[in-house]
Amino acid sequence: MLISSDASLASAFTNGSSCSLNKLLASLPADAYQRLQGNLVLTSLTMRQVLHKEGQPIRDVYFPAGGVCSLTKTMRDGQTAEVATIGSEGVIGAGVFFGDDLSASDTFVQVAGCAAYKMSTLHFTAEMERREALYDRVMRYSQALLTQVMQTTVCNGLHSAEQRCCRWLLMTCDRMGTTELKLTHEFLAMMLGVRRPTVTLILQGLHESGLVDNSRGSINIVNLAGLEAASCECYQSVKATFHRLLPEISAVA
């Protein structure tokens, strides 16, 4: 039985609210998921909540059930940029199984979702050591995530800020399952590693092109096809890799 310290949160899942399942967990065979349930704790996700801090021990692994989390790196001069995005398709902190119990990045909630399934690193590692269904999914997911990091690195170096912004909005939309994103210009600028005025000018241009609507603290995508056309090839490249490596997860509604 799934454990939760928040009765209202557990009730929301039970009654089928806007909360969603973690697709990686949902893709597991029934017997594998049932065995995991006793070690999963349902925990809420709030905006800007820090799940892992760079250089600090990873004590829990998270399987988001909605929302979007960012992995970011901060330089000595204080500049920060996102290196990867994780939503309900993935797992946060799986690196502990590969021998690194210190977080390589800051990981925090960029767009609040309903909740996440939390598992201690001890239980996660023990389950991975079985070399069964969870091991199979996490290994392939880790490869797909590595591809995302590599593509993001190339994208940041070679593509315009406007193309990168379009890619970021599309990726976030995919993970949220909605075209209305609760984001500020300041936050988006930090994710892209650019100045806030740059983001304001980009979004103004996208609005004038009929691709997005802007309001305070919110960006609504009104033309997905047009936004994808304005993006670079990196969006489709990463998306295709996830579909190829993780068809089971892609098939989960």
Image (spheres, rainbow, N blue to C red):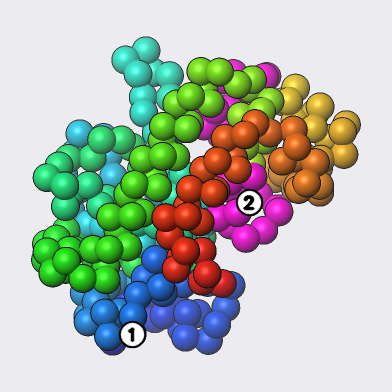
Look at the picture and state if 141 lies above or below 185: below
* Residue 131: image location, x then y, percent: 16, 66
- Looking at the rendered image, the disc whose residue lies closer to the viewer, 1 or 2, is 1
Residue plotted at (62% across, 34% down)? 233
**In front of the other: 244 or 159:** 244
Q: Which residues are magenta?
A: 170-199
**In front of the other: 203 or 96:** 96
Q: Amino acid at mark 2?
A: Cys
User: CA–CA distance between discs 1 and 2?
Assistant: 29 Å
**In front of the other: 80 or 131:** 131
Q: Amino acid at mark 1?
A: Ala
Residue 99 image-quadrant placement: top left
Residue plotted at (87% across, 33% down)? 209
* Residue 167: image location, x then y, percent: 62, 37
Residue 115 seen anywhere in this rendered image of the structure:
no
First of labels 1, 2 by sequence position: 1
